[in-house]
Amino acid sequence: MLSDFTDAISPSQEDALLARESSRRLAKFMSTGKPGRSMSFRIQDDGMPEETVSIPVSAFRLLNDILTQMAQGNAVTLIPIHAELTTQQAADILNVSRPFLVEQLDKNLIPHRKVGKHRRVLFQDLMKYKHEIDQHRRAALNELTAQAEELDLGY
């Protein structure tokens, strides 16, 4: 369940500034990391000896994405791909109403399972659905743009 994971972290203004600087400095190394390899960091905290930590390049990229979002003042949370969401959590992620989401589930547009009388949606299935509707939206926008250009509407 999603409730087993940590709540979203909303950065303070000080955290956002630090995240911006950290993200900027880490971005220099983004192109040097190859998938399947690791990157190392030196970490030092007050009263503790310095230590070197190696992390996978994929985790390094995720860390940089987190810092970028924090720098923009956005709340951040991590959701494992296998997490099961309630209908309200899924609706919140899609930024739609719960009744609309339930309608999509009833139409079998999003895979789900029932636990008693409650529906549960896998995060990965929700993201697949979101990707599909985003593709449909982009296609519709591209079609509208092409029509506007064809009609010389000046947008």
Image (cartoon, rainbow, N blue to C red):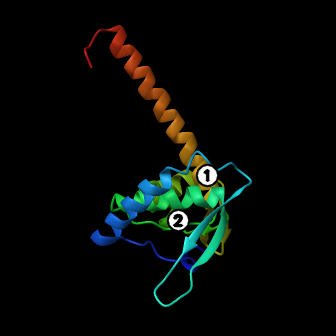
User: As drawn, which residue projects farthest toward the bottom?
Assistant: 47
Q: Do the residues labelled 1 and 2 touch (CB within 8 Å)?
A: no
User: As drawn, which residue projects farthest toward the right?
Assistant: 36
Query: Residue flagged by tag 2: what amino acid is it?
Result: Thr
Q: Residue at x 46, y 87 (%)?
A: 46
Mark number, residue 15: none
Of 76 and 21, which appears nearest the observer? 21
- Image coordinates for residue 64, horizontal then vertical, percent: 50, 58
User: As drawn, which residue projects farthest toward the left?
Assistant: 154
Estimate how packed mark 1 is, as few (under 14), some (14 to 19) or many (20 or more) residues with alpha carbons within 10 Å. Answer: some
Q: Is 131 situated above or below 8? A: above
Query: Residue flagged by tag 1: what amino acid is it?
Result: Ile
Of 129 and 149, which appears nearest the observer? 149
149 with respect to 113 (left or right): left
Of 94 and 33, which appears nearest the observer? 33
SS for dot 2: helix
- Whichever of labels 1 and 2 marks the residue nearer the N terminus, that label is 2
- Image coordinates for residue 126, horizontal then vertical, percent: 58, 55
* Image quarter hosting the N terminus: bottom right
Q: Residue at x 58, y 52 (%)?
A: 127
Q: Is 12 situated above or below 108? A: below
* Image quarter hosting the C terminus: top left
Q: Where does label 1 land, which residue?
A: 110
Mark number, residue 87: 2
Residue 97 visible, this angle:
no
